[in-house]
Amino acid sequence: MPTRRDVLTSSALALCGSLVTGGRPASAAPEAPATRQRPQAPAPRPAVKPARLKPGDTVGLIIPSSAQWDPTSVEILLDSLAALGLKGKLGKHVFDRRGYFAGRDEDRAADINAMFADPEVNAIHCIRGGWGAARLLPLLDWAAIGKHPKIFIGYSDITALLMSLHARTGLVTFHGPVGASKWNAFNVDWMKRVLWNGEAATFANTRETDDSLVPVKNRTRTITPGKARGRLLGGNLTVFTTIIGSGYLPDFKDCILFLEDVEEAPYSLDRMFTQLKLAGILGQAKGVVWGTCDGCSPGEGFGSLTIPDILDDHLKPLGVPVYSGAMIGHVDRQFTLPLGVQVELDADAGTITMLETAVV
């Protein structure tokens, strides 16, 4: 299975090749006029909170991005939902494949549209990420989705959907484990607290000492002290920067921004933070939280910046509260964060506190 970097590299090479033939392969049919026009950025919308989960509810299971090659993980997901008193309903195209995608763009988008329209489905859980969700945005039925607000959860490549669903419909979406993630006690507890119990929770890292004198794992680092309040927005840095300028991102004015990534070289993260800065997004945030970035070390060689260097370079000058190390992203145990609700960031304590519930 290719890594996300492999997929993005091959996609870029394919795009370069298509430019030689005027922007599309010579054998391809002309693009529909509607898809040539960049959507206008949506006006800010009030938050629309989905109904909370309860025993007996049905969870729609979809794969908007990379193909799922192991059916066992889907079986584990269905069994895990059953153990929680929930029913799983697989999308029609879950086991499709087209190259590294879970089927054609049209079919993956059709599964999303169908799950929102299905009156039996109470929530939608993405089975995995990878790459490809952003390709679906022009194919979604935004008007119909807006009429049927439901819990929508995932992370990594699913960031494109979490952000665009909130931008286009006001729906509060959830950055949390995908279906193929580990259903450990930590992840289940946070999903229950946020999605089922409707708790206005405080997200604070678990501090573990093991046999050490002081906590070693899951430490947070205050970059700029202080507290700030705003609407929580964010997700995977790579996917986020991929859709800047597309018209599918929400208004970031006075937001609390959270970001994470995985297996990216420091220069790549530096480039993406620079893009956020030049696009005027970083400057609108009232506070920033950096999660985790496994596999992002500077490696061997001379002259590389480190992740702390990059965070200090881009986030300290903002003059707003910032901390790093939150249990967000590509880790076995992660929070379920609601995009679109009001929160308070405490950079000294290393916490995010919801000021309202995310479900009704």
Image: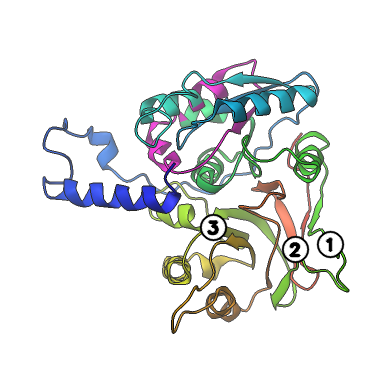
Q: Secondary structure at mark 3?
A: strand
For residue 119: magenta? yes
Residue at 86 percent of width and 65 percent of height: 209
Question: Which disc, if any, is residue 208?
Answer: 1
Q: Residues within 10 Å of mark 2 (few under 14, many from 20)?
A: some
Which of the two labelled residues, at mark 2 and mark 1, occupies the earlier sequence position? 1
Mark closer to the chain start, 3 or 1: 1
According to the image, label 2 marks what residue? Answer: 218
Give the CA distance from mark 3 to mark 1: 23 Å
- State if disc 1 and disc 2 touch (CB < 8 Å): yes
Category of crowding for the residue at label 1, using alpha-carbon neighbours closer than 10 angstroms: few (below 14), some (14–19), many (at least 20):
few
> Along the horizontal axis of the image, is 2 left or right of 147?
left
Asked whether residue 285 is drawn in magenta, I would say no
Residue nearest the observer in this picture, 124 or 250: 124
Quadrant where the image shows the C terminus: top right
- The dot on residue 262 is 3
Q: Residues within 10 Å of mark 3 (few under 14, many from 20)?
A: many
